[in-house]
Image (cartoon, rainbow, N blue to C red):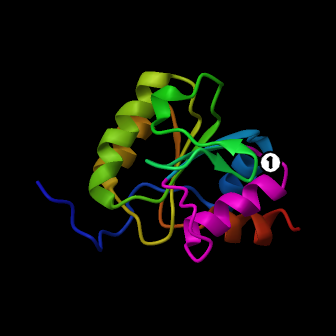
Amino acid sequence: MEKVECEFPRVNSNEAEVKRYLEETRTIAVVGASPNPTKDSHKVTKYLIEHGYDVFPIYPKGDDFYGRKVYRSLPEIDAKIDMVVIFRKPAALDAIADACIARGDVKVFWSQIGIVNNEAAEKAKAAGMNVVQNMCAMVEHRELIGQ
């Protein structure tokens, strides 16, 4: 079944929880981290790197993103991942949730602004992950943690 593009998030975290996730997170995999500097995924990935997170960009092409190795998929990363930030269409979130569950180390399943998939969010939550939907990691970091 095709996911509706304008679904309202039924599973989400509140502001205090989001702040705690950003404070406790050290490693972030960014699914859909584009090398194109005009794309939001590029700007957010760069921002997270510049603010001290150990970032693992995931994109189908390219080898380097601001000195970081670019991975093709979540299972390729052999380091512990605290948070997965997602820049993909809502329909892709089911498979990403499955990959996060298979890893067993992801604490936060985060979909960016405009990206909502309640089924995937419920699956991630049931597996013990914290869920953030329809929020920008960069905007939330700026507002809750500061620059």
Instruction: Using the image as rendered, state which of residue 101 and residue 92 is in the foreground.
Output: 92
Q: Picture quarter containing residue 27?
A: top right
Secondary structure found at label 1: helix
Is 4 above or below relative to 98? below
Mark 1 residue type = Glu
Q: Kindly give the residue lying farthest to the left in the view shown.
A: 1
Q: Nearer the viewer, residue 34 or 113?
A: 34
Region in magenta: 32-55
| Image spot of residue 131 (x, y percent) | 51, 48
Does the rendering let one see residue 49?
yes
Left or right of 91, for residue 59: right
**Residue 56 screen position, x and y as percent:** 64, 41
- Residue furthest to the bottom: 38
The image shows residue 96, relative to residue 12, as above or below, that is above
Residue 37 drawn in magenta: yes
Answer left or right for 61 relative to 92. Answer: right
**How busy is the neighbourhood of tag 1: few (under 14 within 10 Å), some, or many (20 plus)?**
few
Residue 58 percent across, percent down from the top left = 52, 45
Question: Quarter of the image holding residue 71?
Answer: top right
| Residue at figure coordinates x 58%, y 77% from the top left | 38
The residue at the point 30 percent across, 44 percent down is 94
Residue 22 belongs to the span the image colors magenta: no
Instruction: Please tell me which residue is depicted at 83% across the width and 58% down the height of the picture.
Output: 50
**Quadrant where the C terminus lies?**
bottom right
The location of residue 41, given as percent across then percent down, is: 56, 64
As drawn, is 111 to the left or to the right of 54?
left
Tell me if I can see residue 127 in this picture. no
Q: Is residue 117 left or right of residue 140?
A: left
Instruction: Name the residue beneath numbered marker 1.
Output: 23
Quadrant in which the N terminus is drawn = bottom left
Q: How many marks?
A: 1
Relative to 135, is 94 above or below?
A: above
